[in-house]
Image (cartoon, rainbow, N blue to C red):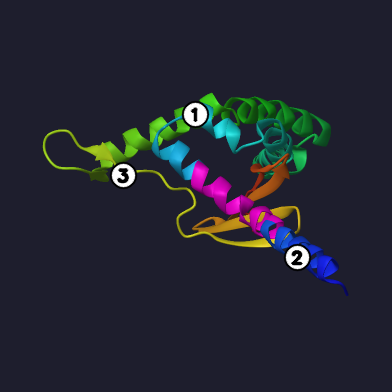
Amino acid sequence: MTRVQRRLSITAAILLAILAVFWFSGPFAAIHGLRKAIAAKDASALETYVDFPALRGNLSPQIEDRIARSISARLGSSANGGLVGRAAKAISDNAVNAMATPAGIGVLLQGDALYKQVGGDTVGDGAIRTARPVDPFAGTHGRFESLTRYVATMTTDGGDVGFVFEPRGLRWKITNIRLPQPKRG
């Protein structure tokens, strides 16, 4: 191997290593950006880190299934499957379309802040105290499911919630939130 070939090999290896570090740090950069946007209550900055159309498309069937199961459980054997399915779809579509937007996330965060203030979960001294900052990624653990999918999983009382990140161009964004599996019973 000549000197020039060796230098090209070393340069290529270094570039490949830099590219790998950049690629695999993407989900962590997205989580950091989401934390900053949420702390600043900047709903428009969330668009940088959330693929809202994909999120709506992935959340809708999950919520639709939960609503249909709930309706069927309440109505029992008298439930008309087609009618239950259409009702569940209409309800879930409206709920997801309202929630899975920057404005919807902003409203949810403001409601959470008000709830924390009323409940005394605040920080600061003096007469004006602010709600403790929201960090939806506190206590999560993550893993790469593939080269193009990273899942940050949070364990809640209701089960595991998974935040799915996938690359969109050079950025990684949330494309799905895997809701806990409904309890059978």
Quick check: 167 above or below 2?
A: above
Left-right relation of 39 to 60: left
Q: Earlier in the sequence, mark 2 or mark 3?
A: 2
Magenta-colored span: 19-33
Q: Kindly identify which residue carries mark 3.
A: 132
Q: Quadrant of the C terminus?
A: bottom right
Is residue 181 among what the camera can see? no
Which residue type does callout 1 highlight? Ala
Q: CA distance from mark 2 to mark 1?
A: 40 Å
- Main SS class of the magenta portion in the image: helix
- Element class at badge 3: loop
Q: Nearer the viewer, residue 26 or 122?
A: 26
- Element class at badge 1: helix
Q: Nearer the viewer, mark 3 or mark 1?
A: 1
Q: Kindly identify which residue carries mark 2.
A: 13
Is 26 inside the magenta-drawn segment?
yes
